[in-house]
Amino acid sequence: MGSPKGNLDTGAIMGSYVGLFLLASVFGAIGMLASSLTNNQIAAFVLAAFLGFMMLNGFEYFSQLPVFAGKGDDLIQKLGIQYHYRSLSRGVLDSRDLVYFFDPDLLFLS
């Protein structure tokens, strides 16, 4: 991957690790929220998987509807996890992205 030797993008690597840690914390918070909403373990898993999928991909797919074309599609994409994770994986540690990942943790774990 680092050809020639030492040609690694350390910013992108560290940003990806930070992003994966924050992504895991959001998914853990979603799982705990789903577990607190139901007594059934299977239902909690299905609900957590659905909510996690919707937070990761749902906003991006929702923004591509023809109703939002050119008007609010970028705003709806910014509500999803994938937009902020993509920024972190490039190596850009922006405070808006970090705050975005901490907000669901605080919201779902409260």
Image (cartoon, rainbow, N blue to C red):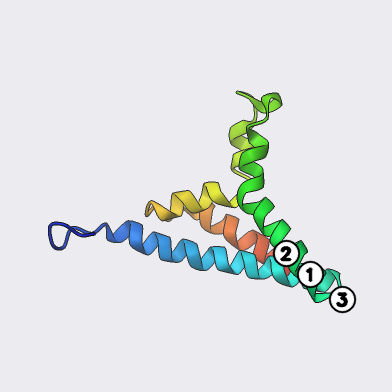
Q: Are marks 3 and 1 in contact (CB under 8 Å)?
A: no
Residue 59 is situated, as x and y percent measured from the top left of the image, at: 65, 43
Check disc 1 and report the residue beneath it.
Answer: 44
Q: Is residue 101 left or right of residue 42?
A: left
- Tell me the amino acid under the disc marked 1: Ala
Check disc 2 and report the residue beneath it.
Answer: 48
| Dot 2 crowding, Cα within 10 Å, few <14, some 14–19, many 20+ | many
> Is residue 110 visible to us here?
no
Residue 7 is situated, as x and y percent measured from the top left of the image, at: 18, 58
Instruction: State which quadrant residue 72 falls in.
Output: top right
- Taking the view exactly as shown, the residue that stands out farthest to the front is 42
Residue 9 is situated, as x and y percent measured from the top left of the image, at: 27, 57
Q: Is residue 13 left or right of residue 69?
A: left
Element on which disc 3 rests:
loop
> Is residue 14 visible to us here?
yes
Q: Which mark is residue 10?
A: none
Q: Is residue 63 left or right of residue 7?
A: right
